Image (tube, grey):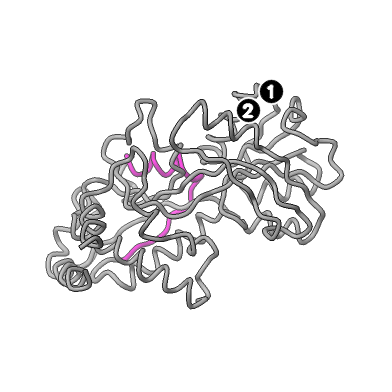
Amino acid sequence: MEARARITRRSVLMSVGGLLVGCTPDPQPGTVQLRLATGPAGAVYRRIGGALAAHITEQVPGATVTTVPSGASTDNIRMLRANTVQLGLSSLDAVITTGGTAPDGISAVCRLYDSHLHLVVMAGSAIDEFADLAGKRVSLGAHDSGTEFTSLRALALGPVDADGRNLSQAESAAALRAGEIDAMFSLTGVPTPAITELAQQHPIRLIPLDRQADALVTAYPGPYAPATIPGTAYAGVPATRTVAVPNVLLARNDLSDDLVYAITDTIFTQTITAASRGDAEAIPEAWQINVRTGISTGSIPLHPGAAQWFRDRKR
């Protein structure tokens, strides 16, 4: 396997002019510029996207990856299809079309980590269960985010008619603290920065979502699974039942196989290694990245370069 990876990286370096089809012309011969769509302020997508971009830039010869802030999942998919970015993060439920396939021109590099749906209220809130959201001011996450996508599905299955607002995670936490909203959804890794900071400054509660998890699993088989946010995640908050959704790294299909092979190798070597060393850029979600689950992208096909990397790992 290691020999294959080294050969592939040399081929990347020697044939970098053919790495990418349809992208902005390279500013210098022998280099390729990639853009990776991440997420809004206060989101794990920002942190893990930054770590991935740094590792790919360092480890893949001739490639430079810059991050692009976004609304998150749905926004990232739109930018991938428009070729304004070449890589992007998305929750698995948001990328699966109604026909159960990936949008045209997009495939998966790998599964990264699972996000958990948080429903956060202040400790003194009168909201005790999901049904209490009726008529309340609730942040659904940033527009075009995975949070908005999944929370709208959960509300529709309720059915619960809430007064939805579109705020980023950081904006949601600030608005909840100020009493401008009554609750906030957040589909994100555990722990997530915006909620961690809020819990450290003010007592909060997480509303159980076990019934909503069951409803989502039944209505949309595949991307959802019942899960628990552990009691160690946020200060003063006990373990809470919820629903989990995998996150995937997506790529445009016109990225070369060698390039995506090298990117996949970097994710499953350098990112995991950085997490185990406790490097400054390492984040808790990086511990979930592993070869066994990385290939599990549901009905979204792997990019041929990524598929080849996983096949080589079995040899």
Q: Is residue 71 magenta?
A: yes
The quadrant of the image that shows the C terminus is: bottom left
Residue 215: percent from left, percent from top: 58, 28
Q: Is residue 273 left or right of residue 166?
A: left
Q: Which mark is residue 170?
A: none
Q: Nearer the viewer, residue 300 or 253?
A: 300
Compared to residue 293, the image places residue 6 above or below, namely below
Q: Residue furthest front?
A: 315
Q: How far is the residue under mark 1 from the one under mark 2?
A: 7 Å
The disc placed on residue 155 is 2
Label 1: which residue?
161
x then y, percent, for residue 81: 32, 40
Q: Are marks 1 and 2 in contact (CB under 8 Å)?
A: yes
Q: How many marks?
A: 2
- Three-letter amino acid code of the residue under disc 2: Leu
In magenta, the rendered stretch is: 64-81
Residue 266 place in picture, x, y as percent: 32, 67
Q: Residues within 10 Å of mark 2 (few under 14, many from 20)?
A: some
35 on left or right of 51:
left
In the rendered image, residue 44, in percent from the top left (x then y), is placed at: 54, 56
In this rendering, is residue 73 above or below 199?
Answer: above
Pick the residue in front: 302 or 281: 302
Q: Earlier in the sequence, mark 1 or mark 2?
A: 2
Element under disc 1? loop
Q: Residue at x 78, y 40 (%)?
A: 180
Amino acid type at circle 1 is: Asp
> For residue 310, which quarter of the picture?
bottom left
